[in-house]
Amino acid sequence: MNARTRRGNRLGLGLVGLVLTLLGGAALARGLGVFPQDWAPARTPIVDGYVTGFFARGGPALWWLAALASLVVAVLAVRWLLVQGRRQTHRTLRIEDGPGGVTEISAGGMAQAVAADVASSPAVLSADANLVGPPARPEVRLRVVADESVPIAELSRHLSAVALPHMRDALDRDRVPAVARVSLEPSPAPHRDVR
């Protein structure tokens, strides 16, 4: 789980906790008779004739709004669950740790270097990379947009012979798992200045 996901979790759970605390505090205060008796008598049920009358007067539109609110909450809950499954990303990677000292590299800088190395191929229109997984066994996730007119073998050769060996050398590892998601697009039309 990355820092952005953790921050989103803390914010979302904090807001839910605040709302539930306020509702619980209001119910407790009502039960203890803190509110004025003419506004909310402590001994009357919360769902009384006024509440049922409100929902009866609301008609179908009120229930459609309740269904829409439930749908929004369900979509947000599913999105939250999907975000939890994202792989951990790193800020730094420890390359060497010994009596002579510790060598660490920036994971973001390494990812940018890998993406730049991949993008140096003429078959690639754009590239993005992330380092994920545990620090002892990092993995690379590449998102590549390739020119559909260039043979895919050219891109494969560039990845296996240039970009990935450079990354393994930089990380000082014999093996670094990598997954590349490649999408094909037409190359952009050449830009001409007319004066």
Image: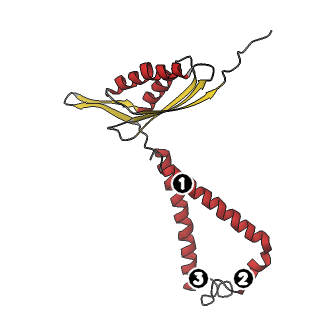
Q: Foreground: 164 or 65?
A: 164
Residue in the picture at 45% in, 32% down: 108
Q: Which residue is mark 1?
A: 80
Q: How far from the left and from the top, in percent, is residue 64?
A: 74, 67
- The residue wearing badge 2 is 52
**Above or below for 110 versus 33:** above
Return the mark for residue 30. Answer: 3
Q: Which mark is residue 148?
A: none
Q: What crowding class fits label 1: few (fewer than 14 Cα within 10 Å), some (14-19), or many (20 or more)?
A: some
- Residue 7 visible from this viewpoint: no
Q: CA distance from mark 1 to mark 3?
A: 34 Å
Q: Residue at x 52, y 55 (%)?
A: 81
In the image, is 195 to the left or to the right of 25? right
Q: Could you tell me which secondary element the residue under label 1 belongs to?
A: helix
> Which mark is nearer the camera, 3 or 2?
2
Q: CA distance from mark 3 to mark 2?
A: 19 Å
Q: Indicate the position of residue 167 as horizontal and vertical percent values.
A: 40, 25
Mark 1 vs mark 2, foreground winner is: 1
Tell me which label, 1 or 3, sits earlier in the chain. 3
On the image, the x and y values in percent for residue 146 come to 58, 25
Disc 2 crowd, CA 10 A, few/some/many (<14, 14-19, 20+): few
- Front position among marks 1 and 3: 1
